Image (cartoon, helix red, strand yellow):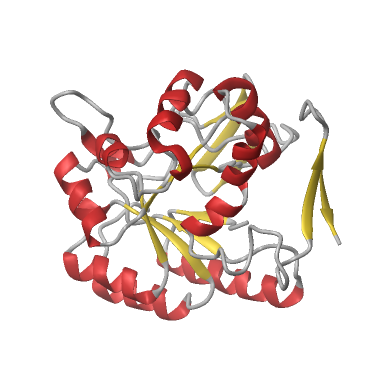
Amino acid sequence: MLPCLISSSHENILKGIEAMKNYRIKYNNGVMGMHLEGPFLNPVKRGAHLARYVRTPTNAELEEIIRYGKDVIKLITIAPECFTNEQIDMLLESGIVVSAGHSNATYEQAAYAFSKGIQLITHLFNAMTQFGHRSPGLVGAIFENENIFAPIILDGAHCDYAAARVAYKIKKDKLILISDALFLGKRVQEFKWDEFNAKLVDSFYRNAEGNLAGAAISMADAVRNAVTHVDIPVSEAIKMATCRPAQAINMDTKVGSIKTGFPASFVKFSNKLDLIEAMVL
């Protein structure tokens, strides 16, 4: 998994990188690195991210994040329309996987970003320009390009299951699962950090503005929902949670499959998927 740090100050980003470095030295439990979601997003599509931290990137800040986050930041979500060509190239050349999300990009802007080398997006349908017959938007560019991996949050709130069924027919083996979980098991009712707040309302986390503020499902829940509500075969749903996400973040040579030299991490489940349990040998 990739723990996610949402939009925050530059100082806090550096603290987050340092915390992840220290954690990985101390523990060896499947944490592969971190996902930096923001702060270089489009404020129009910031969702639950705090407006005070969402900002336009500068070369100097990007260079320091890349330098300090080497081998720690595995994934960064950006709004590509807010970046210069030089800045996008800087990120792509760093080895960090770049994902387009929280974006107000037009279809043309999105298609151009994909042509530059971005091959992943952050949570399909959420916080992005939608598909319209005159303005295809980011969703249209994702659907058109067969090379783009599209993670989706299958909790019944972030997108309707009918929309997920359509996406599966279009994206096929490029549709993958993420939990986007803020907390699991609905054990935490409220959470506050700085001005960020989230409250469990009808089984979904929302902030004071009413925006969704992260999911409450596990990856096991996502697999179960894919089979139950999106009519995806079990074997496909498992691939959507394992080898294909590994491919999307260029880590399929290390995790996601049962191979010699890979972590001996397995999952056992009942035929009805009502019991799913992790096994680490």
User: Which quadrant does the N terminus fall into?
Assistant: bottom right
Relative to 194, is 24 on the left or the right? Answer: right
Q: Residue furthest right?
A: 281
Q: Is residue 22 above or below residue 139?
A: below
Identity of the residue drawn at 75% across and 64% down: 29
Residue 12 shows up from this direction: no
Identity of the residue drawn at 66% across and 41% down: 219
Identity of the residue drawn at 21% across and 25% down: 132
Q: Quadrant of residue 240?
A: top right
Give the image location of residue 5, x and y in percent: 52, 56
User: Which quadrant does the C terminus fall into?
Assistant: bottom right
Relative to 97, is 240 on the left or the right? Answer: right
Give the image location of residue 95, x and y in percent: 41, 73
Residue 278 shows up from this direction: yes
Give the image location of residue 113, x and y in percent: 23, 55
Q: Is residue 88 above or below residue 199?
A: below
Q: Nearer the viewer, residue 10 or 215?
A: 215
Q: Nearer the viewer, residue 112 or 189?
A: 112
Q: Quadrant of residue 19?
A: bottom right
Number of numbered labels in the structure image: 0
Q: Nearer the viewer, residue 91 or 177?
A: 177
Give the image location of residue 76, x and y in percent: 42, 60
Q: Quadrant of residue 276?
A: top right
Identity of the residue drawn at 36% across and 37% down: 127
Q: Is residue 198 above or below residue 266?
A: above
